[in-house]
DNA sequence: ATCCGTGCAAATCCTTTGCATGCTC
DNA sequence: GAGCATGCAAAGGATTTGCACGGAT
């Protein structure tokens, strides 16, 4: 749940302009789903501002991701990107049937790559994703 | 490193026909890269059988994945699917710069979801992916 | 002989790009 | 006023689909 003012400040401080379109997109991110897709944002924005283009939505989401205001999440094999408004370190639990996505607020600090497996790589981060069936899909 | 005969047997036992195209694709999977893309398979197949279509390659890879002969891997944000010919339980180490992908042969059995986080989900599997820079990309 | 599998081309889905207009700073 | 941001439409890349033909069993 990011704070709208914080997101706006990210744009301002990087010398970008605050347009009505950007403000609307940021408002939706601050209030809506935790893992929206670009298309969901587009549908919601155009409900209020009919002429906003997908290009603007994609553009804004990209820049915000570059500024660290959202994270990109693509590990679910859905064929499209999700934007994760939770920028704290966390992991995911994904229902392979209905694609419901839940945050796991556990850091898995114990997950470390055995050095003999690291083959000289400099590890920057790791992601643990659980795949399963949500309660509704276990029938 | 799957065995060609095993892959062929998967098709046979499920009542599917062994065509020259399928055999060629399976041979490439049995001998080639551990994490090929559909396009790479297509390029390699057409080098020997010029008229094979992408549809056949995608089709064969799909069916083989459904039969468990390969795993689909999409957690790298490249915008396309990779097929993982290593069907043993394992995890991945990915270079975010050159996209080199290495298998981690460690089971991370200690990674379990705290039950209070599972929110009723039936967990089927989990994937640990490390993102970093390979030795060549650390300059 | 029966189907399943194939190649082709077009279609689809998500995302990106080019460009002239318009608005924020 | 300067320059970035916008909308539009077209392009792009990966993958899927429809369909008539051909080959495997």
Image (spheres, coloured by chain):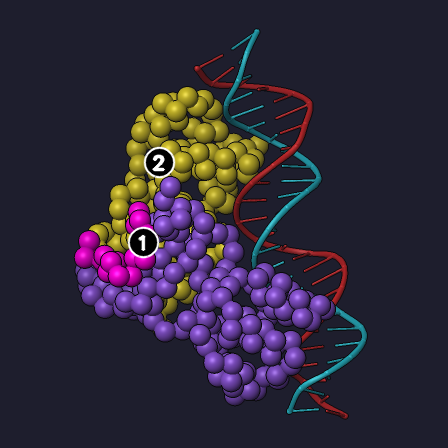
Chain colours: A yellow, B purple, C red, D cyan
* Residues in magenta, as a range: A109-124
Question: Would you call the spot at circle 2 few (<14 residues within 10 Å), some (14-19), or many (20 or more)?
Answer: many
Residue at image x 19%, y 53%? Answer: A109
Q: In which quarter of the image is residue A70?
A: top left
What residue sits right under mark 2 in the picture?
A69
Q: Which of marks 1 and 2 is in front?
A: 1
Query: Foreground residue, A104 or A108?
Result: A108
Residue at image x 46%, y 77%? Answer: B2
Q: Which chain carries label 2?
A: A
Relative to C4, residue A100 above or below: above
Residue at image x 65%, y 81%? Answer: B19
What residue sits right under mark 1 in the picture?
A120
In the image, taking residue C2 as reference, residue A57 lies left or right, namely left
In the image, taking residue B53 as reference, residue D1 lies left or right, namely left
Q: What element carries label 2?
A: loop
Report, in whole angstroms, how far the alpha carbon at label 1 lies from the one at label 2: 31 Å
Quarter of the image where the C terminus of chain A is located: bottom left
Indicate the position of residue A69 as horizontal and vertical percent values: 35, 36
Residue at image x 51%, y 81%? Answer: B4
Looking at the magenta stretch, what is its main secondary structure?
loop
In the image, taking residue B20 as reference, residue A71 lies left or right, namely left
In the image, taking residue B80 as reference, residue D19 lies left or right, namely right
Indicate the position of residue A27 as horizontal and vertical percent values: 39, 33
Indicate the position of residue D8 as horizontal and vertical percent values: 65, 34
- Whether residue B127 appears in this view of the structure is no
Indicate the position of residue B92 as horizontal and vertical percent values: 36, 60
Query: Foreground residue, A37 or A76?
Result: A76
- Whether residue B106 appears in this view of the structure is yes
Q: Which chain carries label 1?
A: A
Is residue A104 located in the magenta-colored stretch of the structure? no
Indicate which disc, 1 or 2, sits on the residue closer to the N terminus.
2
């Amino acid at each position: 749940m990011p704070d709208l003012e914080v997101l706006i400040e990210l744009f301002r401080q990087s010398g970008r302009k605050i347009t009505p379109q950007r403000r609307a997109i940021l408002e939706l991110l601050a209030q809506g789903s935790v893992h929206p897709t670009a298309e969901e944002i587009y549908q919601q924005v155009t409900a209020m501002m009919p002429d906003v283009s997908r290009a603007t939505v994609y553009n804004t989401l990209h820049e915000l991701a570059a500024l660290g205001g959202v994270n990109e999440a693509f590990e679910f094999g859905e064929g499209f990107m999700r934007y994760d408004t939770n920028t704290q370190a966390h992991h995911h639990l994904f229902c392979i049937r209905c694609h419901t996505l839940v945050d796991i607020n556990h850091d898995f600090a114990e997950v470390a790559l055995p050095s003999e497996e690291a083959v000289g790589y400099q590890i920057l981060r790791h992601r643990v994703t659980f795949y399963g069936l949500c309660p509704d899909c276990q029938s």
